Amino acid sequence: MDVLDQYKKAWENQPEDEKKVSKVDIYRMTKLRSSSIVKWIFIIGLLEFAFWSILNILISKTKYIDVYSELNMLTLLNYTYYINIAVVIVFLYLFYKNYTSINTTDNTKSLMSKIIKTRKTVKYYLLYNIIGGILLMIIFNIIIINTPNGIEMLMPDDAIKITDKSKLLSMFLISQTIVVIVTIGFLVLFYYLLYGILLRKLNKNYKDLAKLDK
């Protein structure tokens, strides 16, 4: 049981005429804990931005870039990369704004409103990353399929020896379907570990405030 839970338990068990004083203490601790959670959401967002940026730089130095160049997809990759950077920066700004706004709240209802806003911002961010990643993979695969010898460029040497185009296409679709499923699973787990725990704690704070407000 943490300090805030101890405060709440003591507050619920004390005489009614004393609750108004300790209610302020509970609100302040809930506010501090909520502010700390939102600060960590912002910090994790910055670290995640740095991680994906470094990963993108490393990938750009591998042989796969040559393949995408042969498929005439470098322009699309570059546009996608810069658009994604712009969108992520906007979300990081919103994370920071949510953090500063929680610090300046002065009443329970305002804090509850800020918590709801923060949760929505994080959920939109997660949906953007997961859905955006899936759509991008689908678009790239469509381009590869419709590019002459596109499949052969990405398939292993043993596979490209297959002369039956329909069989080669089936192998490619199966392999890409597996990649998409694994990617979805990785992204969901990745964001669940990064943000899911913090969101649940933030939701708990919201419920505590709602109970306190009543």
Image: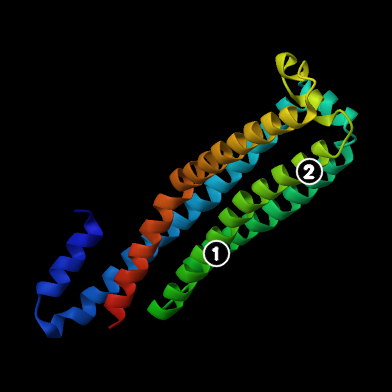
The residue positioned 47% from the left and 73% from the top of the image is 105
Q: Are marks 2 and 1 in contact (CB under 8 Å)?
A: no
The residue positioned 9% from the left and 80% from the top of the image is 15
| Camera sees residue 179 | yes
Q: Which residue carries the number 2 mark?
A: 142
Q: Position of residue 58 (x, y in %)?
A: 71, 25
The residue positioned 25% from the left and 61% from the top of the image is 4
- The kind of residue on which mark 1 rests is Asn
Horizontally, residue 45 falls left or right of residue 83, namely left
Q: Secondary structure at mark 2?
A: helix
Q: Which residue carries the number 1 mark?
A: 98
Q: Position of residue 102 (x, y in %)?
A: 48, 67
Q: Secondary structure at mark 1?
A: helix
Q: Give the CA separation, mark 2 to mark 1.
A: 39 Å
The C terminus: image quadrant:
bottom left
Please tell me in which quadrant of the rendered image residue 179 appears.
top right
Q: Position of residue 53 (x, y in %)?
A: 69, 36
| Camera sees residue 104 | no
Horizontally, residue 71 falls left or right of residue 195, namely right
Q: Is residue 80 above or below residue 29?
A: above
- The kind of residue on which mark 2 rests is Ile
Query: Dot 1: within a 10 Å radius of its alpha carbon, few (fewer than 14), some, or many (20 or more) residues?
Result: many
Q: Is residue 130 above or below residue 47?
A: below
